[in-house]
Image: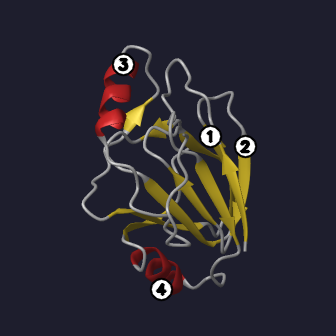
């Protein structure tokens, strides 16, 4: 398994997360095995909540951290706002997005299937990029507990010192 850690800066209309990075874990479960992906996440306390794709517009969550397990196909996900980095992920990969991390689908394969999961006890809201609501969003994210662990490895989630 290969893993990448991406620290995103706070942006005017998208808070991202000042204390937690995005993680990308590559090839952690077999392609097409939705039950294996869900069991991996659930085994570390991240409860699978949906099976679908990724929205094509910038959005983020202030009340939950999110894990996106790519079960089938491939997708390019832009992180942060419209100027953020684009990350290609494919079947078997897991993208872990701390609360506040802007994300959107840029392109996808026709067979894309994603499992979304959240730490036990967290329910996601959905926010759009907005400078008018940025301060309130940042305050909500600051009150949210950090993830209990990485949904892929079960190890402590990395934090800024």
Going by the image, does 39 lie left or right of 135? right
Q: How many numbered circles are shown?
A: 4
Q: CA distance from mark 4 to mark 1?
A: 27 Å
Mark nearer the N terminus (2 vs 4): 4
Label 1 CA crowd tier, 10 Å (few <14, some 14–19, many 20+): many
Mark nearer the N terminus (2 vs 1): 1
Seen in the picture, residue 49 relative to 124 is either above or below; the reply is: below
Q: CA distance from mark 3 to mark 4?
A: 39 Å
Secondary structure found at label 1? strand
Label 2 CA crowd tier, 10 Å (few <14, some 14–19, many 20+): some
x 68%, y 69%: residue: 73
Nearer to us of marks 3 and 1 is: 3
Secondary structure found at label 3? helix
**Which residue is labeled 4 in the image?**
35
Q: Where is the C terminus found, in terms of image quarters? A: top right
Say how the picture is coloured. secondary structure
Label 3 CA crowd tier, 10 Å (few <14, some 14–19, many 20+): few
**Which residue is labeled 2 in the image?**
86
x and y, in percent, of residue 133 in the image: 35, 20
x and y, in percent, of residue 32 in the image: 61, 82
x 61%, y 29%: residue: 9
Mark nearer the N terminus (2 vs 3): 2
Mark nearer the N terminus (4 vs 1): 4
Secondary structure found at label 4? helix
Residue 93 visible in this rendered orientation of the protein: yes
Q: What is the residue that sits farthest to the left in this orientation?
A: 121
**Which residue is labeled 3 in the image?**
135
Secondary structure found at label 2? strand
x and y, in percent, of residue 86 in the image: 72, 43
Q: CA distance from mark 3 to mark 1?
A: 19 Å
x 42%, y 74%: residue: 44
x 52%, y 85%: residue: 36
């Amino acid at each position: 398994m290969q893993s990448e850690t991406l620290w995103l800066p706070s942006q005017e209309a998208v808070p991202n997360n000042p204390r937690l990075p995005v993680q990308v874990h590559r090839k952690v479960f077999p392609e097409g095995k939705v039950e294996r992906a869900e069991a991996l996440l659930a085994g570390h306390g991240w409860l699978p909540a949906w099976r679908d794709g990724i929205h094509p517009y910038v959005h983020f969550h202030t009340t939950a951290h999110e894990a996106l397990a790519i079960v089938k196909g491939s997708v390019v996900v832009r992180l942060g706002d419209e100027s953020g980095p684009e990350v290609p992920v494919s079947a078997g990969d897991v993208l872990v997005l701390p609360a506040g991390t802007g994300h959107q689908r840029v392109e996808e394969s026709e067979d894309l299937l994603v499992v979304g999961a959240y730490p036990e006890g967290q329910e996601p809201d959905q926010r759009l990029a907005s400078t008018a609501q940025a301060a309130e969003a940042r305050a909500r994210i600051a009150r949210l507990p950090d993830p209990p662990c990485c949904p892929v490895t079960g190890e402590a989630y990395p934090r800024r010192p």
